[in-house]
Image (cartoon, grey):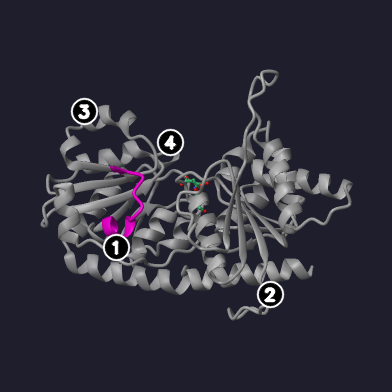
Amino acid sequence: MKILNHKSKIPNLKIGIVCYPSIGGSGIVATNLGNELAGLGHQVHFISYDRPFRIGLKNKNIHYHRVKVNEYEVFRYPDYTLPLAEKIGMVNHDFGLDILHVHYAVPHATAALLAKNVAQSLRQRFPKVITTLHGTDITLLARDPNLDSIIKYSIEGSCGVTAVSESLKNDTKKILRISTPIEVIYNSYSPKSITKTRQAVRKSLRIKNEDFLAIHISNLRPVKRIPDLLKIIAKTGPNIKLLILAGSDFTPFLPLAKKLKIQNRIKVMPAVKDIQNYISAADVGLYTSEKESFGMGILETMVYKKPVIASRTGGVPEVVENKKTGFLVRVGDIKGFTKKIKQLASSPALVRKMGEVGFLRAEANFSNKKIISEYLGYYEKILKS
Ligand code: GMT
């Protein structure tokens, strides 16, 4: 067995990763983790209903297994949990997984536990199940009386549980009243090489060099409070523009943009892969979420040396240091956000300084190297337990 040189003595592992393939935080985190682990020599098996957005399929250690959902007439609603459990069982049978790392309690951890029961009934070996909580499964779904006991069961039945922030860990303990130990392992992101100049990107977006450009990266779900973003921009001057890297359709927000007469000051780019080029061409990150257990877009913005103005909610204060790497503002405080964006727009030196401090903070706390080695250490601990 080959021993890896990553401060960890664990041999090459066979790791199953169950995640959402869509352009959302959890899918991006899971894919990044899998890509990095494969780069270290581990065999990584992604299991999902579609190919994850940023999967590195060129690496021979990365494998993708599609879950096929059957739409039998007898079922009024197609079910995903059962075919997912079946696929997990098949992948484990064919490849003998050591770890099954599922991202999201429902339905992923639930399907993992079902697959484990089936394997045990067949006297087959089953990997250690590790569940990573990302936010919505706790802050939204766990409050739903139709789901809470299944979520609790799925978490308590896992061999190991991680959360992406202290805030999410505390919410999980409080909302679900569970005593299972939860390890906080933050999300990670390391800079990628920039392939287009700031001028070239701005030209393609028809944004002038002297414009102050705010950037927002998200899936535009209601929790992101997109109307707040638009109202903030509307309250600033004409040289302040907004670029949205959107993970879903922006059309529902167009009427508000028109009403606020800012449609010419907003640029929306869907499904962008080279986010580094766009963030580098911007001046500040703007994140107005109601709830956010971590805020991947925020971290990505900091990594490219941009200050961030964000809501003081959930795990965001663990990422953004108020007045040092940007500003934290009360959720929904349009005036407060506007004041901060205007302050930064009039102080290039402060933008540069906060951007630099943010980058150093991201590098020290949330680099791929640090976080992947924390995950490997955690795998090792769970494998030994
Ligand atoms: O809301 C999103 O951006 C998607 C969502 C998800 O589950 O994919 O994101 C959650 O997980 C991300 C990765 O760990 C975190 O960075 C986000 O803060 C979290 N979203 C919320 O808590 C609303």
Mark 1 lies within 8 Å of ligand 1 (Cβ measured): no
Crowding near the residue tagged with mark 2, few <14, some 14–19, many ≥20 C-alpha atoms within 10 Å: some
Q: Which residue is mark 2?
A: 11
- From the image, tell me which residue sits under label 3: 259
Q: Is residue 213 left or right of residue 318?
A: left
Circle 4: residue type: Pro
Tell me the distance, in whole angstroms, between the alpha carbons under discs 3 and 2. Answer: 59 Å
| Range drawn in magenta | 269-279
198 above or below 50?
A: below
> Answer yes or no: do the residues labelled 2 and 1 have beta carbons within 8 Å?
no
- The reply to whether residue 353 is visible in this rendering is yes
Amino acid type assigned to the residue bearing label 1 in the image? Lys
Calculate the distance from the C-alpha at mark 4 to the C-alpha at mark 3. Answer: 19 Å
Asked whether 381 falls inside the magenta stretch, the response is: no
Q: Which of the pair 32/164 is nearer the observer? A: 32
Residue at image location 31% in from the left, 30% down from the top: 251
Which residue is at 68% across, 32% downward? Answer: 145
